Amino acid sequence: MFKKGIYILSQAILAILAAGSLLLVLARLVTAIFAWPRTYRVESAPAQRVAIVFGAGLWRDGSPTPVLRDRVATAAELYFSGKVQKILMSGDNRFVYYNEPGAMHTYARELGVPGEAIVLDYAGRRTYDTCYRARQIFGIKQAILVTQGFHLPRAIYTCNQLGLPAIGVPSDLRAYRRSAELYWNLREIPATLVALWEVHITQPLPVLGEPEPIFPLEAQ
């Protein structure tokens, strides 16, 4: 009787694990399918008024990581090719010595992007927050999202589901370390499920504030 109970319990645990794994894979699949027709290269992307760059970490000296540099460089290419008029750089600035938007701004200026084309969002702590604030705080109605391919499906799905029609341009400009790429892709699996949960179920409010429309005098 005891062995039978253990067997039933083990089968139940396996079933739960299998269902959980399937749910994780399905979430990633849903966002990938949704994002695929909305993903372009710089040269083929339809022009939009704003590109949104997502934060991606800083080195200890406060400079952008290679991943973040590639995102900024891709956004700069969109700007110089006439695809966008403004670049919204959204990242985390909760700590005194950690300023993602500031680091992105500095690097974009080094690349030649004029200061008047750059808008900074200091409360883009997560992808959800960036998409939500882009619409609610900065008044963006359409955008090109700029991030690496591993993150782009979640970003495109999240922004669109939050009422911000968006397409994406991948910013994979170099070969990254395999271990890093493996980590990023594995992390995306639960992150994508959380994104779907928040977009469709909990709908949390990020840090907001007074509206700061990028184009205050005209409709987008």
Image (cartoon, rainbow, N blue to C red):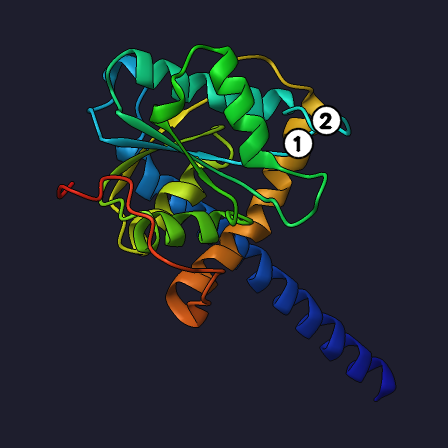
For the point 27% across and 11% down, the residue is 81
For this orientation, the residue located farthest to the bottom is 1
Q: Quadrant of residue 13?
A: bottom right
Disc 1 designates what residue?
Answer: 182
Image position of 14 (left or right of 153)? right
Give the vertical position of 97 relative to 39 (above or below).
Answer: below
Separation of marks 2 and 1 at Cα, in angstroms: 5 Å
Q: Quadrant of residue 181?
A: top right
Other residues around mark 1 within 10 Å, as few (<14) / some (14–19) / many (≥20): few
Q: Position of residue 66 (x, y in %)?
A: 62, 20
Disc 2 designates what residue?
Answer: 179
Front-most of residues 122 and 17? 122
Look at the image and tell me in which quarter the C terminus lies: top left
Give the vertical position of 119 relative to 3 (above or below).
Answer: above
Determine contact: label 2, label 1, CB under 8 Å: yes
Front-most of residues 121 and 167? 121
For the point 58% across and 52% down, the residue is 190
For this orientation, the residue located farthest to the left is 219
Look at the image and tell me in which quarter the N terminus lies: bottom right
Front-most of residues 29 and 51? 51
Q: Position of residue 7 (x, y in %)?
A: 77, 75
Looking at the picture, which amino acid does disc 2 mark? Ser
Other residues around mark 2 within 10 Å, as few (<14) / some (14–19) / many (≥20): few
Looking at the picture, which amino acid does disc 1 mark? Leu
Q: Quadrant of residue 165?
A: top left
Q: Position of residue 33 (x, y in %)?
A: 34, 41
Instruction: Give the SS element for disc 1.
Output: helix
Instruction: Give the SS element for disc 2.
Output: helix
Front-most of residues 131 and 151? 131
For the point 42% across and 18% down, the residue is 74
